Image (tube, rainbow, N blue to C red):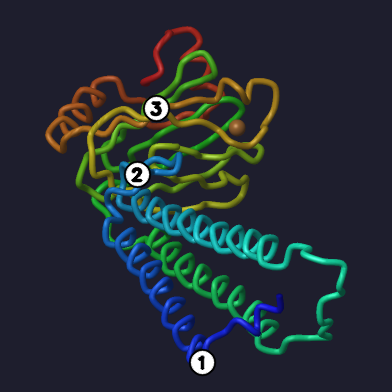
Amino acid sequence: MDPSTSRRPGGGVLRNRRISRRWAALGAVAAGLLLAGCNLPTFGAYRGATTQGQDAFKLWQGFFIAGIVVFAVVFFLILWAILRYRKRSDAIPPQTQYHTLVEIVYTVVPILIVLTLFGFTFVTENEVDAVTSKQVTVNVTAFQWGWQFQYPKYHVRVLGIETQDPTMVMPVGETVRIYLRSADVVHGFYVPAFNFSRYALPGVTNQFNLHATTTGTFRGQCTQYCGLYHSLMFFQVKVVSPSAFTTWVHRQGNSVTPTGSITSAKHQIATSGTGSI
Ligand SMILES: [Cu+2]
């Protein structure tokens, strides 16, 4: 039986109302999910131990939710098309060359989604990359194969090679400015718990702020394949209270060697067995 013959007068209006109600329900669910944003799963990412990392995390959550919504809509449409237009007889259904409204919708909607995601990314990147006021400065130098963390204000230098991971100590609740350099080849400064990664490039100084919000010790590593012992190029970031940071600085002050090349410092580490010189 032709379905059109069973339609009652006014049936189209009723159907439209039902569809509107379904979309309203879907919208309410989406709004509820957004309002409950804090309780949403992490989708495999770190929540971020710095304000910059938390900004990146929120962006990640937004992207993941957008991906889920797009997946659900596409999956529903595929399923609907399969069921609604399944073969019911040998009769060839009406053939249409184009459908202007549908074509406009499936062109405009993806463009709007991309523009929206681009806008959120732009805002977040500006927040993460902002280098405003700072309380502590750390010069970070990557080299084959280790890290040097130098605190110019306190004349403290921490250096570690492949067998001894160095630890960068920083105070919680204060803004730390990092000046990142490489002494030889391209390296990558990456702290997963901070949701942050940046190139260390020879001849270039990259600068960024880190504002830790929780204390703890976090793993860091080089993310660019930089030679034989790249896989051993780890470091730690230890976030402590400001008073503990001051204590640490004073303790380091007794064994400071603020000058000297990385090569000579590496030799000292190898012979003295300490990563803090
Ligand atoms: Cu490296």
Measuring 61% from the left and 23% from the top, which residue is drawn there? 231
Residue at image location 48% in from the left, 73% down from the top: 119
Image coords of residue 8 (percent x, y): 53, 87
With respect to residue 249, does 76 lie above or below? below
- Write down the residue under mark 3: 236
Q: Secondary structure at mark 3?
A: strand
List the residue tagged with mark 1. 9
Residue at the (22%, 30%) spot, across then down: 249
Amino acid bearing label 2: Gly
| Mark in front: 2 vs 1 | 1
Residue density around tag 3, few if under 14, some if 14–19, many if 20 or more, within 10 Å = some
- Say which amino acid is labelled 3: Gln
Relative to 213, does residue 109 appear above or below in the rendering?
below
Q: Which picture quadrant has residue 236?
A: top left
Residue 175 position (above or below residue 20): above
Labels 2 and 1: the sequence-earlier one: 1
The single residue placed furthest to the left in the displayed view is 243
User: Is the Cβ of the residue at disc 2 closer than 8 Å to that at disc 3?
Assistant: no
Up/down of 72 relative to 13, above or below: above
Q: Position of residue 237 (x, y in %)?
A: 36, 31
Residue labelled 3 has its Cβ within 8 Å of some atom of ligand 1: no
Q: Of helix, strand and loop, which one carries label 1?
A: loop
Query: How far separated are the C-alphas under marks 1 and 3?
Result: 73 Å
The residue where tag 2 is placed is 48
Q: Secondary structure at mark 2?
A: loop
Q: Earlier in the sequence, mark 2 or mark 3?
A: 2
Question: How many C-alpha atoms fall within 10 Å of the one at disc 2: few (<14), some, or many (≥20)?
Answer: many
Amino acid type at circle 1 is Pro
Q: What separation in Å lies between label 2 and label 1 (alpha carbons)?
A: 58 Å
Q: Quadrant of the C terminus?
A: top left
Q: CA distance from mark 2 to mark 3?
A: 16 Å
